[in-house]
Image (cartoon, helix red, strand yellow):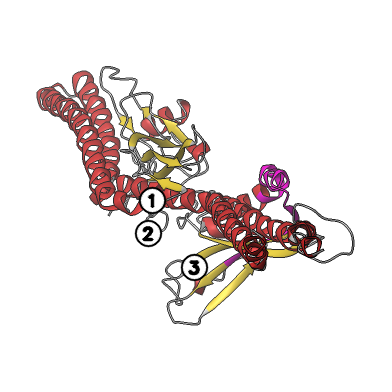
Amino acid sequence: MIRTHERKNIRRNSGNMLILSGVFITLLAVLALVACSFGGLFFVFNRIQTTTDELALTGARKLNEQDRIGQMNNMIARCRQLVYDAHKSHTYAYEDASQLNQLAEQLHDEAREGAILLEAERQKLRVVAVNEAKSAITERYEELKEGHSLVLPWLKVAIPTTPMVEFGYAKDIRSNVAELKGIDDLEMEDNKQSFVLTDSHLYKENIDAKISTDTELHFRISSLPAPVQSTVAPARCILAKQYKSLVAADLPSVCKVEMKLGVDTGIGADAHQEMKSTGIAVATGGEKVL
Amino acid sequence: MSITSQRGKRGGTIAEFGTAFVVLVVFFFIPLVNLSFIAVRYFIAQGLIQEYVHRLAQVEKRSDAYSMLSSDTWWKDFCDRCGVTVSSHVLKLQVCGANSGEKITVNGGAPVSTQWLPGGSKGPCVYTMDLFVDVNVPPIYSGGPSVPGITSPLPLQIAAHSNWENLSRNPVTTEYFINE
């Protein structure tokens, strides 16, 4: 018995601290790693924000591809001038030059028909531009989405959700159409109705610039950055407070993309969070009319 | 007699372990947790400032960025809530030219010279808003002799950058928005 007891006492006691230190250091390392991961959530957010901005820019660039919205705005303004002038000529011919009345009437009708056709094309363009922008965003999203996934034992970052896309216009961005000169009456009428801004001499954004002589026709001029001294405004991201939703059937010039990203910390029973990021971009500006 | 001399020595180990445990916790565990929180707070502040400079770079005019920086307090308040104190901040515009190494820094409301503007002779240029923020990042426990990072806040400078977005001109003044 005594021998057995001695043998037990002979067992070494050193090494306890080594094990304890090892456990503590491991625990600390894990804590530090987990803590840094939580700090890294901001990094994850910045990443998803960059992707959302890129998608918004992709959509915005597509909206005014080859200056289609800018050209439509300019055509509408010129068509409006033509209708106004044709009506004026027709009135003059009817009252003072009856031999030209038939021709004037025909020209007026053609101008009106042109305006109606242009309005129909404008509505088609709206659908085409929006659909193409959505397709471009979806295509780019498919390319980028896989890069976000991250799986660590303590942090799981999911693939971002399919982007939600909205179209609108930007506050304080007028139209790209410069005030048209040549018809004094129309200029006066525009000034009276405040269609044209006195400082920039540009038409206001998202207006239906109906003419008093023919109120049945619509001349919708949309918001788009105007060219200034041959400088075309490049597409760019803007702040959320500048975004405005479209209220009428105007052509959009701003693309808003929202995405959500699931982040699971893996700690606790209900540690799932969703990060939401919004990217807003304004389309490339209108080009200078030659 | 022989039995008394063979008394167990394990009680001595318990006493040693207690002291060693206290030493380990006080001089190793707590300081290390203290230090690790500086890193966490730094990461949070860095992320927040990066997000903020991104917003500053998206405003319409450059003067708007300066006025936004001076009027906004939410980001400082958020830093405060995370324990990080903002002591000072500087916002600059850095313009990098087409040739490598060519760059200028524009402070405050000073205009960018024509050659560095879009379409200028130094172009095409890259315009970056740089925000430098001096912060004090404290550990969880502070007090006693002032040792930055261990018993008192660690002064650090956080730099964040974001590309300037609006490269168009103002239709009213015909000036570039970057110079307004």
What residue sits right under mark 1 in the picture?
A151
> Going 22% across and 47% down the picture, which residue do you hit?
A139
> Going 11% across and 24% down the picture, which residue do you hit?
A99
What residue sits right under mark 3 in the picture?
B117
- Where is residue B135, by image quadrant? bottom right
What residue sits right under mark 2 in the picture?
A230
Distance between the Cα atoms at labels 1 and 2? 50 Å
Q: Mark 2 lies on which chain?
A: A
Looking at the rendered image, the quarter that the N terminus of chain B falls into is bottom right
Q: Which of A112 and B59 is in front in this view?
A: B59
Of tags 2 and 3, the one toward the viewer is: 3
Distance between the Cα atoms at labels 3 and 1? 44 Å
Q: Is residue A186 left or right of residue A141?
A: right
Measured from the top left, where is residue A154 in percent x and y?
A: 47, 48
- Amino acid under disc 3: Leu
Measured from the top left, where is residue B52 in percent x and y?
A: 58, 50
* Residues tagged by mark 3 and mark 1 found on one chain of the structure: no
Q: Residue A85 carries which label?
A: none
> Going 43% across and 35% down the picture, which residue do you hit?
A204
Report if residue B87 lies within the magenta region.
Answer: yes
* Total numbered badges shown on the rendered structure: 3
Report if residue A37 lies within the magenta region.
Answer: no
Distance between the Cα atoms at labels 2 and 3? 14 Å
- Tell me the SS state at disc 1: strand
Callout 3: 10 Å neighbours few (<14), some, many (20+)? many
Image: magenta residue range: B69-93
- Tell me the SS state at disc 3: loop
- Amino acid under disc 2: Ser
